[in-house]
Image (cartoon, rainbow, N blue to C red):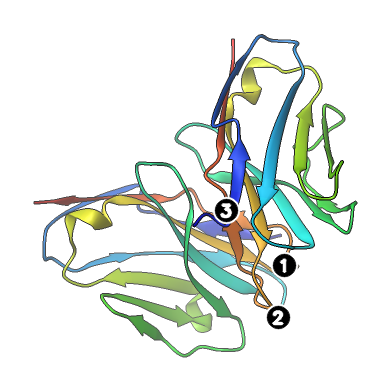
Amino acid sequence: AQKVTQAQTEISVVEKEDVTLDCVYETRDTTYYLFWYKQPPSGELVFLIRRNSFDEQNEISGRYSWNFQKSTSSFNFTITASQVVDSAVYFCALTYTGNQFYFGTGTSLTVIP
Amino acid sequence: EPEVTQTPSHQVTQMGQEVILRCVPISNHLYFYWYRQILGQKVEFLVSFYNNEISEKSEIFDDQFSVERPDGSNFTLKIRSTKLEDSAMYFCAREGLGPTYEQYFGPGTRLTVT
């Protein structure tokens, strides 16, 4: 069974603070793919990053960074020097078939100016 | 530029009515997906569609739902007899280029069943 858990329902930070969004997953498959999506107040789902199960390299993209650890089944997302525009709901997702995505329940991030 | 467009952006319908939600890909893709998101909840997979056939579907995708690509371009999701609990945002998605597995979502159609 596939499952994605985002234990943090809501997070509030003051602008310029760093924030980490947690994602823990469960899967019996050895090959799988993990994703993060951003859902701003306008409602669309914006792809942020994909990670393969066989590639544990962490990744940095500007103020965003991702920490993938198979040993703890976690794929955490850190925003450095948060900005008001980062306010959104962030979803972690998993697929092993490339078809069905299993989404977590999302973390609502509010960045206070 | 959106990856896919969806029409309508908002649809209000009465319980028991049929609705058709449309998805138009910007460029040629073979894989399409429908997801729904009940307000304030997580995004749930409904169905994937490849080469004019359903390739995978979830438990949510029961006999009330159907998908097709009637003219080789538009990709539609039909709900035959809507229920109040069908009220949700419905997202169409297409696959990424190459074997990357990410999915790119359209802006969604908000369905309200009254």
Q: Position of residue B32 (x, y in %)?
A: 74, 55
- Residue B22 lies left or right of residue A38; in this view the side is right
Query: Crowdedness of circle 1 by 10 Å Cα count: few (<14), some, many (20+)?
Result: some
Look at mark 2 in the image and give the residue it sits on: A30
- In the image, residue A46 above or below residue A53: above
Q: Nearer the viewer, mark 2 or mark 1?
A: 1
**Answer yes or no: do the residues labelled 2 and 1 have beta carbons within 8 Å?**
no
Image mark for residue B105? 3
Look at mark 1 in the image and give the residue it sits on: A98
**Answer yes or no: do the residues labelled 2 and 3 have beta carbons within 8 Å?**
no
Chain designation of label 2: A
User: For residue B11, what is the image quadrant?
Assistant: top right
Q: Residue at x 67, y 58 (%)?
A: B94
Q: Position of residue A97 (x, y in %)?
A: 75, 67
Q: Residue at x 53, y 67 (%)?
A: A35
Foreground residue, B44 or B27?
Answer: B27
